[in-house]
Image (tube, rainbow, N blue to C red):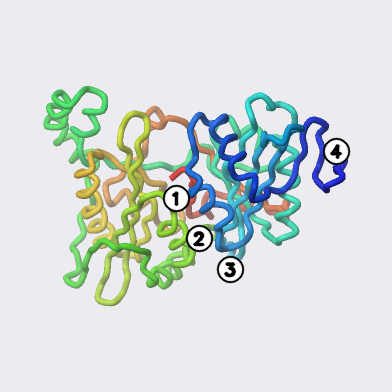
Amino acid sequence: MPPSPDGAASGGEWISRPYAPADEQGILDLCSRVFGSEMPPDLWRWQFPDNPFATAVVQVAEDSGGRIIGHYSQVPVPLWRDGESQLGSYSILSMIDPGHQRKGILKRLAADAESRLVEQGILTGATFLNENSYPVYTGQLEWTEVYKRLPVVFLVFDVGAVASRYTGSVLGRVVGFLGKPIRSVVFRQQRAVPDSLLEIRKAARIDPRVDALWSELRTGFRYATDRTSLYLAWRIDQNPRQYQIYIAENGNELVGLAVTRIDQKFGQRIAYLVEFLISPGRLDAAQALLQSALGDLRKEGCGMITALAPEPGGQRELLRHCGFRDLPPFLAPHAIHFCVKDRHRPVQQQALADPAGWWVSWSDHDVV
């Protein structure tokens, strides 16, 4: 595809070019046409132009009438890879106008964006894909799958609240009463004795002491978004979405951090354990944090919570000790594929795709 006079790549009836600030409304309009819902402008700006780590790589397709018909983007984030912190990126919000699909637009946008990423030295990529985008990314864009289905776990803490979403409030209360004994068996915790110095409290912002906690945890795996206080402040504090932060302290030491979010989906209030960082061996802190968070979620009308449960760092075992169980596939609305790309050393992409190396949580997913 030859370059057009202005340096953009031309597809005849459309061109591929880097995003410009004047494109914002056109991108938001495209989002509405593709997904059937409006994306808040402040959320788009937070993800892209206001990214504090590097200039977000956003490539758009524009038709001959000046309308934005395609969008491919990579959001730079700090990445922990093989013992060092470097810049990586997450591919999010890929979309092509319904009237312009199957024209090779996404492939061209991705190629142009990937070239820009290599020029910036952002060589490791990751993304979460649904069933629609998975074949394109793995088949045409050369991404490699880490998880075919993300390891999602869940915890039901109010059977009545969950049942009410399907049966109505009156019957839901009955089901909730009858289901309590079953819930206590299925979601049984491994009880831990809390330290007498342990204190749990809500926090208005990310605690800077999380740096010491994260430094202790990240040595247990090869790959992860580098969850420094700077990153988490951007991801949680500055995010237009609303989150609740809980911290566990042992004297002056931060030994646990939990972040939750409530979302309205599928006709019910769904809770996410967005982030869960616990100092090794502190099951008491993990359980105390969850007890505080679940109490607040119950007041908000939630009956269950989900979390991502990777194997590295003992996160999966920790969550199971706290009562979480594997989410059955029939309860998941759709599969979520986690895929990666090594732009500099493709021969190492298979090593990068080893699920035993990755720490992931819902905070890595742009929808949560």
Label 4 secondary element: loop
Q: Amino acid at mark 1?
A: Pro
Sequence-first disc among 4 and 2: 4
Crowding at dot 2, Cα within 10 Å, few <14 / some 14-19 / many 20+, comes out as: some
| Kind of residue indicated by mark 4 | Met
Mark 4 / mark 1, whichever is N-terminal: 4
Image height of 334 relative to 16, above or below = above
Q: Which quadrant is home to the N terminus?
A: top right
Separation of marks 3 and 4 at Cα, in angstroms = 38 Å
Q: Is residue 350 visible?
A: no
User: Rounded to the nearest whole Å, what is the CA distance between mark 2 and mark 1?
Assistant: 10 Å
Specify whether residue 4 is in view. yes
Image depth: mark 1 or mark 3 in front: 3
Q: Are marks 4 and 2 in contact (CB under 8 Å)?
A: no
Residue 251 percent coordinates (x, y): 25, 76
Residue pointed to by mark 1: 310
Q: Earlier in the sequence, mark 3 or mark 2?
A: 3
* Secondary structure of residue under mark 1: loop
The relative height of residue 355 versus residue 304 in the rendered view (above or below) is: below
| Mark in front: 4 vs 2 | 4
- Mark 4 sits on what residue? 1
Q: CA distance from mark 4 to mark 2?
A: 42 Å
**Residues at marks 2 and 1 touching, judged by CB atoms closer than 8 Å:** yes
The amino acid pointed to by label 3 is Glu
Q: Residue at x 58, y 63 (%)?
A: 53
Q: Earlier in the sequence, mark 2 or mark 1?
A: 2
What residue did someone put label 3 on?
84
Residue at the spot of label 2: 221
